[in-house]
Amino acid sequence: MTGAGAGPHGHHRFTSTVLGPHARGREFGAHWRDRVRATADAYLALFARAGVADPDAAGAQALTRIHAWAPELAQEIRGIAEGAGLLVDRVAALNARTEILASGRRGPGRGECTTVVALGGPGQEPVAGQNWDWYESLADSWVEWEIPHPDGRRTRTLTEFGVVGKIGINDRGVGCLFNILHHGNDGAGMGVPVHVVARRLLDESGTVTDALRIAGSAATAGATGSTTLTVVGGQAAGKTAISAELRPGGIGHALPDPDGLLIHTNHFLTRPGADGDTEPVTDPDTLVRYEVLRRRLHGRGADLTADEALAALRDHTGGVCVHPAMPGPHEFRTLATVFLDTGARALRVIPGPPCTHHATNDKE
């Protein structure tokens, strides 16, 4: 295996060396055995806190849905479980953590990701990045994973240990950013896990249109944990950005403004999803973050630089850059800031809250 290890600030990297999905998963699970098991333990605590009685049973249901919709990824999950020495249902539950948490009582928290995309002018690649905000207990439970495929395709994803995909980009210049949503119909049954949707989208898409078709297929198959997948394409992949808002019963699509700017936080931007949105009532900081960035970046869709986008993501107004309110594993903070480099087909990852880094130190 190549490129395995940790950089500064807990930035773990791994490049798979085997191509078959089961063997690839087994290699990953064996190499990161302790990390996968620790991530599973952290989620068991979160599931229990949310009142989920039997997450392994939910994982078994999720594995059935994954096998039907993305059989290769079901094989990869089985391999991760085998390599890490865990029950496959436990690893499947990791991959369905959004859906499982949606089925329980909502835990406390504030801020769950802020996304900014500026398409840029003619001949330019988009500027696309996000803050990933999540629980303090998962602060050291993520990895940048490069995945080669037998036909030469490559996927790069920043994901949690044991979870097949999340934020990422592929070698064709199609990327995906990730914002959780909350809808009144979430949590009924088990749908196709949104993290599996993100990974299949990255594996298979050559264009933004391809990616939206895959997201639409997942919506048709059924979703039970609402999430926004913002698909970003470089010049070679149908240069645009569109946010696909998955929810139980369907999908909505939010487009960039006429200047080429697209901002997403954690409330629905489209209807009918917005009609069942619970986030503006329970966690209205999503509205504040959206408004702060919309005002700050208005008219900048054609000329916003990556450093300027990063400066906006450092803003503390409304929790754009998130720090724990107090010490504790169930507090929220920005675990990483991630930019998609659609020209180089690479990820630029800045561990921790972005305000703790300076521009000269951001090239991780």
Image (cartoon, rainbow, N blue to C red):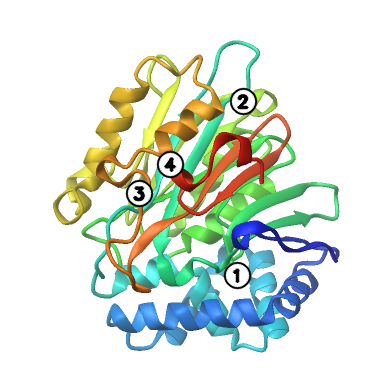
Please rate how many residues cluster around mark 2, counting C-alpha atoms within 10 Å: few if below 14, some from 14 to 19, many from 20. some
**In the figure, residue 237 lies in which quadrant?**
top right
The residue lying toward the viewer, choosing from 295 and 53, is 295
The residue lying toward the viewer, choosing from 165 and 290, is 290
Instruction: Provide the residue designation for mark 4.
Output: 244
N-term mark: 4 or 1:
1
The answer to whether marks 4 and 2 mark residues whose Cβ atoms lie closer than 8 Å is no
Q: How many angstroms separate mark 4 from mark 3 (CA)?
A: 10 Å
Q: How many angstroms separate mark 4 from mark 2 (CA)?
A: 16 Å
In the structure shown, which secondary structural element does the residue marked by tag 4 occupy?
strand
Instruction: Provide the residue designation for mark 2.
Output: 238
Residue that appears at 68% across and 81% down: 33
Label 3 or label 2, whichever lies nearer to me, is: 2
Whole-percent x and y of residue 358? 54, 39
Q: Quadrant of the N terminus?
A: bottom right
N-term mark: 3 or 2:
2
263 with respect to 35 (left or right): left
Q: Amino acid at mark 1?
A: Phe
In the structure shown, which secondary structural element does the residue marked by tag 2 occupy?
loop
